[in-house]
Image (spheres, helix red, strand yellow):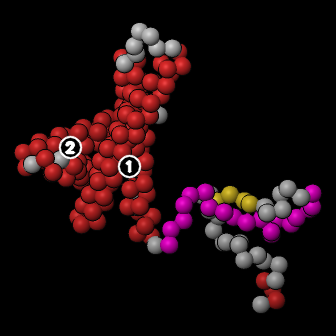
């Protein structure tokens, strides 16, 4: 036991290239021995190996990502439509201040409305997709298509069975097209 006194707890017998050295005293002008440098990983660490094999966001991250992205996209698109609507509603006697007020009111109202609607669609899609992935324990194109189908059907369920069926079919087609487009971009666009 006395022979290992100068050995650090952070030394390892195998050299791993996925680490970087970290010196907690780097901002101080003090000579520090190399035994006080820590090897930190450069990739995420997982408690179980099963977690490291999955290349997917968790359901909470998925829910936050889809809802936030959908709300932001809907708000921006709604604001753009609101600007056009505000410009169309100009009257001949309006001052510049009144025109700006019309544009801001119209874009704010339409942006909020569209953002909320599209955000709810993103929320439903993320919830249904996470549920399907948890139930089937696989994540592929068909999972996204089923989630899109379910989202469209649930979103328009209050308007009747026919409207829900049409919206479900459109949602499934849209989700399949987005996933297929993502695969095409990954394959043919150098990023």
Question: Which mark, residue 66?
Answer: 1
Question: Which percent across, then down, holds residue 95?
Answer: 51, 14
**As drawn, is 104 to the left or to the right of 142?**
right
Question: Which percent across, then down, holds residue 137?
Answer: 27, 65
Residue placed farthest to the bottom in the image?
A: 1
**As drawn, is 27 to the left or to the right of 120?**
right
Q: Secondary structure at mark 1?
A: helix
Q: Who is closer to the viewer here, 57 or 127?
A: 127
Q: Quadrant of residue 134?
A: bottom left
Residue placed farthest to the top in the image?
A: 92
In the image, residue 158 sits, relative to residue 110, either above or below, namely below
Instruction: Compute the Cα span from label 2 to label 1.
Output: 15 Å
Whether residue 96 is visible here, answered yes or no, is yes
Q: Which residues are magenta?
A: 29-47
Q: Secondary structure at mark 2?
A: helix
Whether residue 56 is visible here, answered yes or no, is no
Question: Which mark, residue 158?
Answer: none
**Quadrant occupied by the N terminus:** bottom right
Q: Quadrant of residue 124?
A: bottom left
Cβ–Cβ under 8 Å for marks 2 and 1? no
Question: Which percent across, then down, holds residue 20?
Answer: 68, 57
Q: Is residue 44 magenta?
A: yes
Which residue position holds label 2?
171
Q: Who is closer to the viewer here, 173 or 39?
A: 173
Identify the residue at image location x=83%, y=78%. 6
């Amino acid at each position: 036991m006395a022979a290992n006194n100068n050995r650090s707890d952070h030394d390892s017998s195998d050299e791993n290239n996925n680490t970087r050295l970290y010196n907690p005293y780097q901002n101080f002008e003090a000579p520090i021995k190399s035994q006080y440098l820590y090897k930190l990983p450069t990739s995420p660490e997982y408690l179980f190996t099963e977690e490291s094999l999955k290349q997917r966001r968790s359901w909470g991250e998925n829910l936050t990502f889809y809802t936030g992205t959908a709300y932001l996209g809907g708000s921006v698109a709604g604001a753009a439509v609101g600007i056009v609507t505000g410009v169309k509603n100009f009257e001949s006697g309006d001052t510049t201040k009144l025109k700006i007020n019309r544009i801001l009111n119209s874009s704010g109202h339409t942006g909020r409305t569209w953002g909320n609607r599209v955000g709810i669609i993103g929320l439903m899609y993320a919830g249904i997709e996470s549920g399907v992935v948890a139930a089937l324990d696989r994540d592929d194109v068909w999972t996204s298509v089923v989630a899109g189908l379910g989202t469209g059907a649930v979103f328009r369920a209050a308007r009747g069975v026919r409207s829900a069926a049409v919206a479900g079919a459109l949602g499934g087609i849209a989700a399949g097209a987005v996933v297929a487009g993502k695969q095409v971009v990954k394959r043919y666009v150098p990023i």
